Image (cartoon, grey):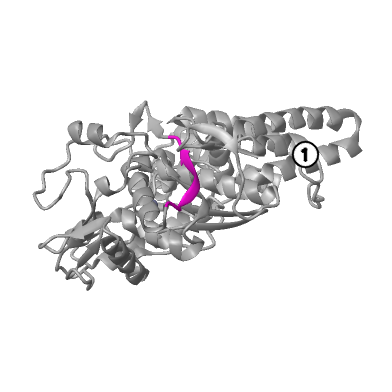
Amino acid sequence: MKIFDSKSSKKINFDPLKEGKVSLYVCGMTVYDSCHIGHLRTFLSFDFIVKSFKALNYDIHYVRNITDVDDKIIAKAKLEKTSPSVISERYIEEMHDDFLSMAMQSPDKEPKVTEHMESIISFIEDLISKKFAYSTKNGDVFFNVESFDKYGELSNRKLKEMISGSRIEVDDSKKNPADFALWKNSSDEYSWESPWGEGRPGWHIECSAMSRDYLGKNFDIHGGGLDLKFPHHENENAQSKCNHDGLFANYWLHTGPLTIDEEKMSKSLGNFITIKDILKKYHPEVIRFYLFSTHYRNPLNFSFGGLDESKKILDKFYDALRKVDTSNVKNVSLAEGVIQSLKDDFNSPKLISFLHKTLDKLNKSLIKNKKESQSMANILISSGEVMGLFQSKPEEYFKFISSEELISEKEIEDLIAQRNLARTEKDFSKSDKIRDDLKAKGISLEDLGDKTSWKRVNLEE
Ligand SMILES: [Zn+2]
């Protein structure tokens, strides 16, 4: 089994700490806003990675944290005149809904910062006592980057270059401008007691503490989006290795960036697309098929055209499956083509090309060999499972209606009023057109005297 280790920038053999077991920590959401499609790409990639390990018979322990202490959460709470926990709970619930709609499996543990304050504080105390960190008279605690001679090893940067080329804010209380906060003094309502006074933990320390709580000082894989490699993961790596005699994650996996029109997605550019936005238009499996068509490490320039294209292709798969009785699919052992794709750094495009070859065989067998078509369908369904594909019944898949095609009650009433006006004006071509247009949207009209009632019907009726 080969995986691409982002620290050494090489595809290397995966050799787990315990044979047949995998421990994985992935940095999760900061819960102050809706999840966008960049988040979706990252977490769906890890969903695929987890499912791949399972399909290859590894026993995997998957931890993904929730950052529920953050300045952005506090700022939003102030704006809405509510408490930070109201904001974080709202977006945690929304995230769970989104991920469930995408049929993503839940991590085995989903720790929150607010529930691990003791462990975070004791981690910082240890770093101070071992002289890797220091507190200031303001009640802040910083990590001393010069105390770790390998600082920069993960993101392949040199400390000197970081300082000279950086826009690090000048802070007289820091020993080195690149030192980062482990604890920040504050006395507002979202603060915790600590040996350094009231305050909040810095961002990076939570993952060092929570990964240790659930996976131990040394575990197999640490993952996240590529944008977290520096400074977040670099700093986690420094804290943990200093505190644990050089032990931390053995492998690093980073998912590639997602752009829109070659630009980074951001609210200010107005190109912010949420998971909910695309779920209104596309079946979750279409979204999966589209995202998995690009390898998880490669950059992906998102487009709706690409999603439409993926829908056409997935329709062809389901068209073929519809012609076979898929009601009792037998669990077939994983095809060699699937195993080879997964073992090659979770190569989803390679897996998709295997699916295409299987589809060709299925289509050919549909004409001449009914029995073979059944076994091809079995292979297709069990091969797609690791990507969450072909998990719908074909008839259900084709019934998916984008909610944007749905028409609201008010729109229907307005059109009925227009049609009745046309009828009183004896403009029957107009009134017929309105009735036909509504029918195409699944709305059937019934005239009783001068009253018109309507109902939603199945589009196929
Ligand atoms: Zn993290």
| Classed neighbour count for the residue bearing mark 1: other residues with Cα under 10 Å, few (<14), some (14–19), many (≥20) | few
Could you tell me residue 45's position as x and y percent?
52, 43
Q: Secondary structure at mark 1?
A: loop
Q: Residue at x 88, y 36 (%)?
A: 372
Could you tell me residue 183's position as x and y percent?
23, 60
**Where 30 falls versus 420 (above or below)?**
below
- In the drawing, does residue 358 fall left or right of residue 238? right
Q: Residue at x 55, y 28 (%)?
A: 309
Along the viewing direction, whichever of 208 and 98 lies nearer the viewer: 208
Amino acid type of the residue that numbered disc 1 sits on in the rendered structure: Ala
Residue 43 in view here: yes
Could you tell me residue 264's position as x and y percent?
33, 33
Could you tell me residue 127's position as x and y percent?
30, 60
Residue 406 in view here: no
Label 1, on which residue? 335
Q: For the stretch drawn in magenta, what is the main secondary structure?
A: strand
**Where 265 falls versus 117 (above or below)?**
above
Along the viewing direction, whichever of 199 and 67 lies nearer the viewer: 199
Which range of residues does the magenta coloring cover?
246-256
Q: Is residue 237 magenta?
A: no
